[in-house]
Image: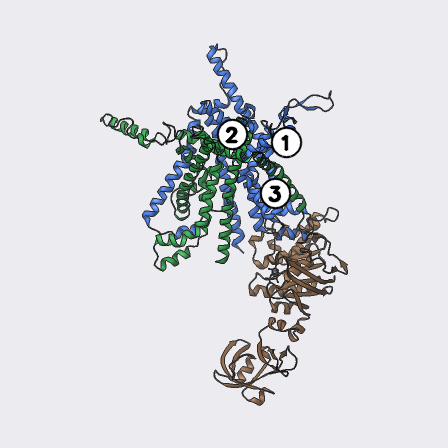
Chain colours: A green, B brown, C blue
Amino acid sequence: MSRHHRVIPGLPLTLGYTLFYLSALVLLPLAALALKAGQMSGPELYRVLTDPVVTASLRLTFAASTIAALVNAVFGLIVAWTLVRYDFPFRRLFDAIIDFPFALPTAVAGLTFANLFLKDGWLGGVGGHITAGINALAHTLGLGAPLPADALDFLTFPYTGQTGGIVVVLIFVGLPFVVRTVQPVLLEWDPEFETAARSLGADSATIFRRVIFPEILPAWVSGVALAFARAVGEYGSVIFIAANIPGRSQIAPLQIVTRLDDFQYAQAAAIGVALLTISLLVLLVINGLESFSRRHERQA
Amino acid sequence: MTIEIRNISKSYGGERILRDIDLKINSGELVALLGPSGSGKTTLLRVIAGIEQADEGSGPVLFDDVDVSNVDLGKRRIGFVFQHYALFKHMNVFENIAFGLRAKPRRERPSEAQIREKTQSLLDLIQLGNLSQRYPSQLSGGQRQRVALARALAVEPRVLLLDEPFGALDATVRRELRRWLRRLHDTIHVTTIFVTHDQEEALEVSDRVAVMNAGRIEQYAPPQEVYEKPASPFVFKFLGNYNLFHGRTRGDEPGEALVRPHDIAIARDPNAAGASARPGVVTHIGFGGAVVKIELETEDKTHVDVEVSAPTFRDLNLKRGDKVWFALRNAQEYVPDFVI
Amino acid sequence: MAGAPLASTSATLNRRAANGNPRVRALLIALTIGFLSIFILAPLVNVFAQAFAKGLDGYLAVFWPPSPPEGATLGVIQQRKLAEAAVQSERTWSAIRLTLAVAAVVVPLNIVFGLAAAWATTKFRFRGRALLVSLIDLPFSVSPVVAGLVFVLLLGRNGVFGDWATHLSWPDPFSLRWVGFDAGFPLDFERDFTGVIFTPLAIVMASIFVTFPFVARSLTPLMESQGTDEELAALSLGASGWRTFWKITAPNVKWALLYGVILCTARAFGEFGAVSVVSGHIDVNDTMPLRIEKLWNEYNNQAAFTVASVLTLLAVFTLVAKTAIEWKTARDHATAEGKQ
Ligand SMILES: Nc1ncnc2c1ncn2[C@@H]1O[C@H](COP(=O)(O)OP(=O)(O)OP(=O)(O)O)[C@@H](O)[C@H]1O
Ligand SMILES: [Mg+2]
């Protein structure tokens, strides 16, 4: 297609509209962020980003996101594998609800998890529930109450104000990314390869390690990276479950909100730029991985 | 309508796909664009259609001596049949064929009754009257092909352009459909260009064949001439099986001669084979019905393929290992002063 | 949300081949069911359990507070309670109205944008196209809080366009009233908003930012894979650009479009971070998610879950629709492949 004549109509209109809309609603606001952060001098910027409260929030965001991403790396892979390879009751239902964290508003996720992990919540109070159940059973058998009420309190999930609760919701929001990137690769996987490997005498573990795993590795890593990126930016669900104490249980996005509420726009912008940079770096890694595996595929 | 293109070039990203192509097609002619994969056939067809634009500095595309280079695809009044048909998946056969009529501007649009009548007559023409309510996914490849043709014909195009019309079909259906296309062309007489990489198809159906190679037209002539007087070794090789003989010219330059297997005479007696007959030993005999393929090995260990008719073979009564004499009846020499 | 592919997830072939160690298999199935039950099913069920903690009456009372019994004299405390309940439910209704209004603006705008962007990036090749595609995806990798922040920095009091934006006056569409013909035009807005940040306009902008890629993203892969042949066929038959789009492209992508619209709507209803930042915690700017936060902060657990249950139902509907669309496209695909 040369410059002066295109057969399919509509390029000037659609491209023009796309560029206008994109610039007005995404690029211009992002430029404002860069501008505000750029107005700070170097030392000032350094001071903001090394403020103990800020560093603590960044550290918390990273630590929680990393742990959540690692948990998702393991369980996401197991879930994807199981959903693709095995048949079990309600498999289709479980498959469908994987996307639930995509669809559920983050505020609702935070609300329900905060409630689940309350001391008397379904999961937070699991030790107490079990103790009460055993005692009730013993009571009906006429054995009195054999267990003290706090016997199983070690099962109680450490949640309030601590990293634990934050990690739980970040696992929730990140799970679909891992499952949904690994799943298609496993689905496309041709079982013939496996049969061939088996006929050559390889056992299941070897086949997984040497044949299947290398195949899903790029997808798996980008899924984990996506889950991590999502966790770093997550706000809605976390603030419901965390105690949000500055310096201890405040995540970085909440720091931005706090600064904004104090009218410290430049500081908010600086933290915003830091977060955005991280997301873009992760995005870059994912793009690199994708083009790597595409090239890999073409060679094969 | 006549089509004439002059000096057309087309590049993609600096790579020249079409090189200075000239082509003139008479009104009502059926022309085949024949060439190997990647030779630029589709590109040339799309330039003629107006789907692609030729490079800056190319000559015009003339329809009836009118330059249409800057006329939109929709205004050129061409019927284009895509290699994979590009039928509208969500419309049934009837609606597919009627699409072009319904898309006409209100002033030119026929009435609903006329549209129905016209579509029905096209359905009859392609012999699919009973399948008009089917969707493309419910048709066989050959049926889809015919629907695509009918859809293109509905708007009464001045030119019909077909990109590998039978490419995706199996051999029997192909043969059937290309005869059908020839008959159809004989009834409607619309100027037609069709792309193919199957030489048999091109030779059998067309009035003239344009043989393409690497973005150039190597020869443009009626089928018989292309076959019997190939303009270049490429054309010769592309049009059928051949034997290649290396030799020397009188000036002692290396050269080659090309001979079709059926253009080699074979006999048990050196004198019966013809002038300058050479000896060979039968190494293999392949029965192929009306034609028998014989493989010979010459003294200098080169292989020669020979084809003889079944009666001739019966008369020769050959076995493997027999010594025979062969002579070239009709060698094409592409270097002057060539001797074997 | 970036990675939700519209892929079918059935693999009978793979599953049949699965014949590993039964103990490993049982362990993995148990882990999967356990993990998904704790992390997905439990929170889902918990929403409804908490919402109905005070029974159906308590649930409904969040929206329709009980009115005082006819003729009864109430104590001061009870009167206070009833009045408070009425205020609370009115705030909830206001949040529902605002959420619907925002989505009603955001979703159509994003549909138009998504269609335009997908058309431009899939039907044409131009320099910078890959960059444009990544830019369209950009909002997915921006933290919602940053998405709100950028608008505050652009249009807030100290923002780049702060001076202009804080004095901008625009009418509240909800205040449109009939004023009779005395003043000329019979319709008028009773209220104006001043400024952008901390008004519903900012909520609309922030919502557009975060929901921006959904429609484009669900259309692009499909339109890319469908190529341009059908469009070219329609154009060659004389159809106009619009007709080609409405009759050929749109029907081919309608399910993907619907899918994108559903995702976009769900996110527009549920967005929290970005909206929270630009809403200024003002009650009239509350959308449903913000309302949930306020109720939660007021220790009104059951009411918070009641509002949450509405959004959860919407999420469940989203999943059902997604599954249905996937099922439908897989079936269409199967029929299209079936008779190839
Ligand atoms: N849009 C394009 N961009 C870049 N290169 C192209 C494009 N279209 C075609 N080409 C190149 O142009 C050359 C000729 O392509 P064309 O499709 O015309 O060949 P063809 O003769 O029709 O081959 P076939 O028999 O395989 O269909 C090929 O090398 C192809 O790679
Ligand atoms: Mg071709």
Name the chain under label 2: A
Question: Element at badge 3?
Answer: helix
| Tag count | 3
In the shown orientation, is residue C227 left or right of residue A47? right
- For disc 1, the neighbor class at 10 Å (few under 14, some 14 to 19, many from 20) is some
Q: In which quarter of the view is residue C107 placed?
A: top right
Front-lying residue, C244 or A61:
A61
- The answer to which of marks 3 and 1 sits earlier in the sequence is 3
Residue that extends furthest to the left in the rendered view of this protein: A143
Q: Mark 1 lies on which chain?
A: C
The residue wearing badge 1 is C161
Farthest right residue in view = B65
User: What separation in Å lies between label 3 and label 1 (alpha carbons)?
Assistant: 30 Å
Distance from Cα at disc 1 to Cα at disc 2 = 21 Å
Q: Are marks 3 and 1 on the same chain?
A: yes
Q: How crowded is mark 3: few (under 14 residues within 10 Å), some or many (20 or more)?
A: some
Observer-nearest of B147 and C225: C225
| Left or right relative to C198: residue C236 | right
Q: In which quarter of the image is the C terminus of chain C?
A: bottom right
Closest to the observer, A230 or A271: A271
Marks 2/3 same chain: no
Residue named by callout 2? A257
Image position, residue B255 (x, y; %): 61, 78
* Badge nearest the viewer, 3 or 1: 1
Q: Residue furthest front?
A: A43
Which three-letter amino acid code belongs to the residue tagged 3? Leu
Residue at disc 1, secondary structure: loop
Relative height, residue A158 to residue B144 (above, below): above
